[in-house]
Image (cartoon, rainbow, N blue to C red):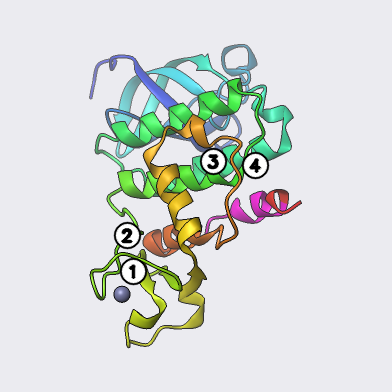
Amino acid sequence: MSQSSPLLTAIVLRYTDYGEADRIVHLLTKEHGQISAMVRGARTSTKKYSGLIDLGNMIEVEFSSMQRDLWIIKTAHGLQSMLRTRTNLHKLAFLSYACELVSMAAQAGNPEPKLFGLLSQLLKILEEEDGVVGSRFRIAFEIKLLSFAGYMPQLSVCPACQKKIHDPATIFYTEASVFHLSCLPSMESPQQSMTPCDVSWLRSCSMALRTPMLDSLSVPMPKGPQWAFAEIITRQYQKKIQSRTFLQSIEST
Ligand SMILES: [Zn+2]
């Protein structure tokens, strides 16, 4: 790429400071999935970049060139910032969590229109809606993310006997599936790889998947393994979710 690129809309997933003045930013784009880009003077040119390169912000960028796998940003301007979200601790914790999950799931170099759509929708809701964030909202985001990344958890039919799930059931993280307790695979199944769940909880999860994100915003979940999908995501990408501890501590208060 030797000439300026067309303008791209991108969401800031994370960034790291580089050298004394620059910043390397990881962006989600519809067209190229996740990209890493250098913002020269991001920390010195306050007039140009003030508040722009921040978590969850949607920006419009033009790239001047590409060196190895690093894009070089020529110009950037803000389309949507997360100012209101940053004044609410729960929403802020959720913002970090959502950006981290997308950063784990989004591929580099491949278009990611579904993940881009999911994250933009979530950011808009966090920033514009007044409702409190309920646990079904997070679960809706986690299940949709898994399904868009091609790892849709099997929640209604037991993979062992092919029959409809009934109580008592167990969610098996490594298989991303729910089994009847009596049908659990005879293979070695360490306790930390599974947890009991019941049909009413599973029904609420399926509802979260099928309905728009906004419909789940302030909806609580029935009793159940509320972090099961985070466990599935951790195993799927073999990576610890750093921002989970903070969000979990806020959710439990
Ligand atoms: Zn079964």
The quadrant of the picture showing ligand 1 is bottom left
Residue type at mark 2 is Gln
Q: Do the residues labelled 2 and 3 touch (CB within 8 Å)?
A: no
- The alpha-carbon separation of the residues under discs 2 and 3 comes to 19 Å
Q: Quick one: SS at disc 3?
A: helix
Provide the secondary structure element on which disc 4 rests: helix
Segment colored magenta: 239-249
Q: Measured from the top left, where is residue 159 in percent x and y? A: 26, 70
Q: Name the residue under label 3.
A: 137
Q: Do the residues labelled 1 and 2 touch (CB within 8 Å)?
A: yes
* Residue 149 lies within the magenta run: no
The residue singled out by tag 2 in the image is 154
Where does the image place residue 41, in percent across and percent down from the top left?
A: 55, 23
Name the quadrant of the N terminus: top left
> Do we see residue 90 in this rendering?
yes
- In which quarter of the view is residue 55 placed? top right
